Image (spheres, rainbow, N blue to C red):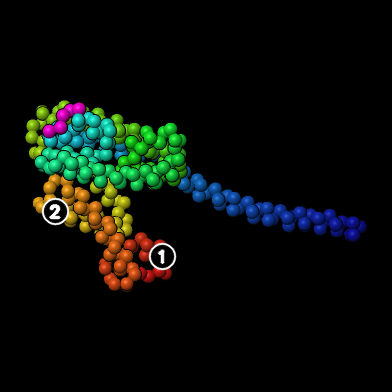
Amino acid sequence: MAEQTAPPQSTAAMEAATEKPDAVTEKPDAATEKPDAATEKPDAAVVRDALGVGIAVGLSGFAFGVTSAGSGLSLLQTCALSLLVFTGASQFALVGALAAGGNPYTAAAGAFFLGIRNAFYGLRLSQLLALPRALRPLAAQWVIDETTAVTLPQPTRRAARIGFTVTGLTLYTLWNLTTLVGALGAKALGDTDAWGLDAASPAVFLALLAPMLSSTTERVTAGLAVLLVLGLLPVLPAGAPVLVSALAAPVVLFLRGRGGKGGHGTGITDTTTAETTPGEGR
């Protein structure tokens, strides 16, 4: 009898032994679900963030409308700039240079070089959004600082598309409406220079840009660009200091490269890189 009951006990033990690995393998599956759940972001939260940026920046189109009309541009020209160009920094640079008596070609060149940054935004956003080919030309009109700032931090492609669409639609609509209102109300305000409205859009742009300067190299580049603009304003014609300030980036990168190769202390080191690769020295 003992010999007959032994096999069932051994098979039961074997079954229990085979069940343990299954239980162990279930734990990693549960653990892998946690990161996915952590990276999810409710659509309502994405829409809220996008609307906040779109409304805050879109209202500053009023300042552009007033400034543009005060610089001598007509209502049609002012509205066409917002509808077709739709990049606040370039628009303000153009009308600011014209208001200061600068050459139209120099003013247009400054605005053009400021707008080039949007092309680099598009390279990153095209991969992140992966929009159908038919929608890409339309989406390209909305590739600006604000839509990029909202889209890039999103954890999923769905959230990125929602953030990009809501920000772009809200900002494009409000910017053009407030541009029209500002241009129509410029005469009622009188001397537009006394209000200082031309500083509204650059102030918003700097507020969005400042948190993105996370490394020492980026902060040094931005600081050098500011010094170049301020130093050259009294010397060069309107619009030209902005073009020259673009030289800050290659200068800082060159100095940083020399410091890394030769071991000389240039004072320009990337703190972010130093933290992520503590074993590597420059």
Position in image of residue 153 (x %, y %):
39, 46
Quarter containing the N terminus: bottom right
Sequence-earlier tag: 2 or 1: 2
Q: Is residue 73 magenta?
A: yes
Q: CA distance from mark 2 to mark 1?
A: 38 Å
Residue in the picture at 69% in, 55% down: 20
Disc 1 is placed on an element classified as loop
**Label 1 packing within 10 angstroms: few (<14), some (14-19), many (20+):** few
- Residue farthest toward the right in the current orientation of the protein: 1
Residue 178 visible in the current orientation: no
Residue matched to label 2:
232
Segment colored magenta = 72-76
Left or right of residue 192, residue 206 in this image: right
Q: Is residue 219 magenta?
A: no
Reply above or below: 93 against 212: above
Label number found at residue 277: 1
Please name the predominant secondary structure of the magenta segment in the image.
loop
Residue 88 in percent (x, y) is at 24, 39
Rendered residue at 10%/41% (across/down): 101
In the depicted view, which residue is nearer to us: 136 or 11?
A: 136
Quadrant location of residue 225? bottom left
Name the element at disc 2: helix
Front: mark 2 or 1: 2
Image quarter hosting the C terminus: bottom left
Q: Number of marks in the image?
A: 2
Left or right, 157 with reference to 60: right
Residue type marked 1: Thr
Whether residue 211 sits left or right of residue 17 in the image: it is left
